[in-house]
Amino acid sequence: MDDSTSGSSSDSTPGPFERGTDGPKVIVVGVDGSDSSWRAAAYAAGLARRQGSKLVLVYVQPVMPAGAAMGAPVVDATNEVAEELMAAIREATERLRGIYDVRWEFRTLRGDPYNGMVQMADELKADAVVVGASESAGHRIMGSVAVRLVKAGRWPVTVVP
């Protein structure tokens, strides 16, 4: 068989980074404790298991401008949410160990949820992003994180109802 038809390359120099060539290697999912974010995490975990991908669960701790006057109580509250999310994730993975093994990690950062998800997806070279549908009526006017991620057009985005 001729090398030109085999699809192999004689050049051993690695090519540029490509997303989605052999299935997702890294799936990023946003979690915030809402029902839709837990459904998104469950969907992403199933996808990661089937594809042999790494699952990265991301909680973006919101920075509340009004909280600046309150100081530590706001930071403590968002830290508490992050700790509760981590505990729930660990409990679920322990309960399902051996049945539903998935390589995963939990990341948290502070900021705007959209910008935080973009930062994590870019930093991790995510092949896919999964988020829950917004449960807030206000997002119909301003645009939800999910809609903004889809419009960014940088990764395949799955929005789980």
Image: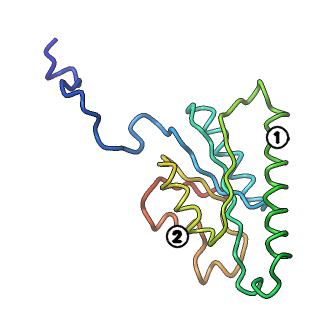
Query: Which residue carries the number 1 mark?
Result: 92
Query: Which residue carries the number 2 mark?
Result: 148
Do labels 1 and 2 touch, CB within 8 Å? no
Instruction: Examine the rendered structure and indicate whether residue 60 appears above or below residue 29.
Output: below
Q: Nearer the viewer, residue 160 or 4?
A: 4
Q: Nearer the viewer, residue 20 or 13?
A: 13
Q: Nearer the viewer, residue 141 or 14?
A: 14
State the SS at label 2: helix
The kind of residue on which mark 2 rests is Arg
Residue at 77% in and 24% down: 98
Q: Residues within 10 Å of mark 2 (few under 14, many from 20)?
A: some
Counting from the top left corner in percent of width and height, residue 131 is at 63, 58
Residue at 60% in and 84% down: 141
The kind of residue on which mark 1 rests is Ala
Check the image and name the residue furthest to the front.
72
Counting from the top left corner in percent of width and height, residue 150 is at 49, 63
Q: Which mark is residue 31?
A: none
Q: Nearer the viewer, residue 122 or 161?
A: 122
